[in-house]
Amino acid sequence: MTQAWMDKTLSPDARATLLIEQLTLDEMISLVHGPMPAMVTPPPADAAMGAGYIPGVERLGIPPLNETDASLGIANPRQVRPGDGATGLPSGLALASTWDPELAHAAGVMVGSEARDKGFNVLLGGGANLTREPRCGRNFEYLGEDPLLAGVLAGEAIKGAQSNDIVCTLKHFALNDQETCRHVVDARIDEGALRESDLLAFQIAIERGDPGSVMCAYNRVNGEWAGESDFLLNQVLKRDWGYRGWVMSDWGAVHSTAKAALAGLDQESGEQLDKQVYFGAPLKEAVEQGEVPFERLTDMVHRILRSLFAKGVFDNPAAKRFTDYAANAQVAQAAAEAGTVLLKNDGLLPLSGSLRRIAVIGAHADVGVLSGGGSSQVIPVGGPGLSLPVAGAAGAFANITYHPSAPLAAIRDMTRNTQVTFSPGTDPAEAADLARDADVAIVFADQWATEAEDLPSLSLPGHQDALIEAVAAANPRTVVVLETGTPVLTPWLDRVSAVLEAWYPGTRGGEAIANILFGAVNPSGRLPISFPREVEDLVRPEIPGQIFGPPEEGRTIPTSRPDVQQHKGRFSVEHPEGADVGYRWFAKHGTATLFPFGFGLSYTSFAHSGLELTGGETITASFEVKNTGAVAGIDTPQVYVTVTGSDGQPSQRLIGWARVALAPGESRRVSVTADRRLLANYDLALPGWRIAAGPVAVVVGTSAEDATLHGEVAVTAGTLKP
Ligand code: BGC
């Protein structure tokens, strides 16, 4: 048979249509559901052994979908591919701290290439959920609290990944903002606010990255499961945004057959985790009974095949091949270096390479750097530096894993004739003794976070705050290096000389940290998430559901808190912050943060001047950036507007930024133009985006709280489609 659909001159749609004509009903059904291959005995012969597998149709040359988690590299939780390591990128918050679309693209290219090397053709990453809850266990997989920043970076990473002729997925659609009770929670929010925040991040990511698939979230949104929400899938994603790829479920997120199919879910993933294989025999029956029109099943299959044609999966099938891990590690290291944020420096950093004695303390810095847990867990090439067992739901994924990139060794490599000693930090008094005798003490502090659980507090776990206090009391020339999944409180801040937020820095994290400590790399990271001063400042001082354990459906939650309500007998969480996530919430409430969104120091200094604004349909801000210090560095000036939000209150919004590398004394004029949706409010009556005419306050700043230039410009009224 000639395979007419293999004619590359035809459009992906035409090719999908030709191929579908050849498919039987059973074959169509087989393309819309699939298992976790590791839980099938024996596993399918052509499974690459990732998180998901959809059988192909061999007689027609349709390849199996071999799906792997890939938020931070090619994951291998539970080591279903025994010993198969991969390059670990720094965490999503580290990548977001780079504010660098090119780096995000390069990271995507690298991860996509490793996916191909291992025989995968569908990536289950990355995530664009806004980090509404700083204690959320998955923040390390996400890109921060701003829709523009998260959307741009997610889009670029997807574009990079898909340049390898594979599909990349965007997840978790939508409002999966806490892990606690993620399988039961109903996240409730005003539609306009949702469109202006999390949905805007997804919308921008889709526009820039054109992912072949979108994964639904576990939770409900405004009463409906994300995977059977006609509003989210049919109306927003497919109608309003014209999305032409397919929607896959999260693993264990399908709750019905006809309802889900009619709402716009196209594929059931990880089907063993659902109560039944809803998109198997029950879907076939529903189609035969007319409950789900045959045209809808055709559309489901069309969307899948179309993406496979559009992204190159048919024309350039993935096959196992050699991986250049050394080259890929450089990509991870570059991202870690650019994503490390210098939070405090009284002048101690950068360190000289010829200090007499350095005490390195804590966080297993002698063996490696921490990574986050869950389905995104990358197993290091050659095995973990350290692997610690963990109990509970998170333990089902993997041990606590340290990438074997020891900061201690990297620090030794940066020094000459320096005695570099190490204390595990388990005994603060012993660590303090070591610090007292040193020129500089470097305390590493870490916080393990994982999918399936939220963090119990914003504090560093265990005795680490006390350890830092003891070391700083013995020697104020103390540097704290944080390896955390999310923001933490720093009660010792005034008593230490410098603080670096290294997040989870990935495969070459130790080297990246040492390069920054000793000034081989000038820190340029900027926070993509606010560090609050205390939990009382958060929208939800307690994580709904967390202190009671996971509620069963219909169980009454004994609480007096206004934000935890019973809704139709279910567990729901209101989102009074609406679109005012993170810095916007703090600005609205006049709450100063510990370290604001956008903040980060450098070893040089910068000045901004000459603000020129153009108004009209949108806003363009142009200004001069100058390196006024003695070393080369990268500045990331940010442009914020304050408009009147839907609630009539002032609403602060990041409209853009520039990332400017400058030699000492060098200056450059840069210009930033707003995406018009950031000047608008979402108007349900329109429906669409509505920009009000009038003057808009514009600032250039070094963070959401620190402005260097002020201006005002008039915009004209306008509307935009949803
Ligand atoms: C996670 C997804 C992941 C899937 C497959 C789920 O638990 O929420 O992000 O892609 O598992 O591993």
Image (tube, rainbow, N blue to C red):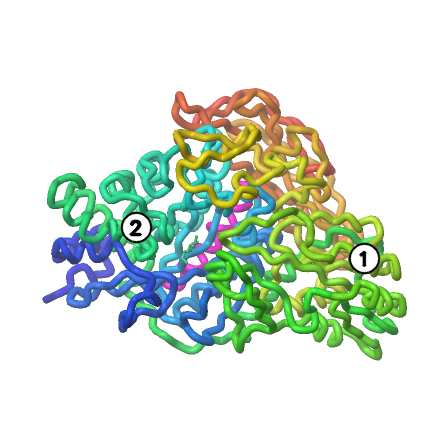
User: Which of the two labelled residues, at mark 2 and mark 1, occupies the earlier sequence position?
Assistant: 2
Q: Quadrant of the N terminus?
A: bottom left
- 107 left or right of 362? left
x then y, percent, for residue 559: 55, 32
Residue 331 visible within the image: no
Instruction: Look at the image and give the residue range highlighted in magenta.
Output: 145-165
Dot 1 lies on which element?
loop
Please state which of the two labelled residues, at mark 2 or mark 1, is closer to the viewer.
Answer: 2
Q: Quadrant of the C terminus?
A: top left
Q: Residues within 10 Å of mark 2 (few under 14, many from 20)?
A: few
Q: What residue lies at 43% left-to-right and 49% top-to-bottom?
A: 171
Residue type beneath disc 2: Lys
Location of residue 423 with respect to 295 vertically, above or below = below
Pick the residue in front: 278 or 240.
278
Is there CB contact under 8 Å for labels 2 and 1?
no
Question: Which residue is label 1 attached to?
Answer: 630
> Does the Cβ of the disc 1 residue fall within 8 Å of ligand 1?
no
Q: Quadrant of residue 219?
A: top left
Residue 649 visible within the image: yes
**The magenta stretch spans residue 158:** yes
x then y, percent, for residue 35: 30, 60
Pick the residue in front: 162 or 396.
396
- 232 left or right of 18? right
x then y, percent, for residue 111: 47, 64
Q: What residue lies at 80% left-to-right and 74% top-to-bottom?
A: 421
> Does the Cβ of the disc 2 residue fall within 8 Å of ligand 1?
no
Question: Which residue is label 2 attached to?
Answer: 275
Q: Residues within 10 Å of mark 1 (few under 14, many from 20)?
A: few
Q: Quadrant of residue 371?
A: bottom right
Q: What residue lies at 56% left-to-right and 47% top-to-bottom?
A: 136
Dot 2 lies on which element?
loop
x then y, percent, for residue 687: 39, 25
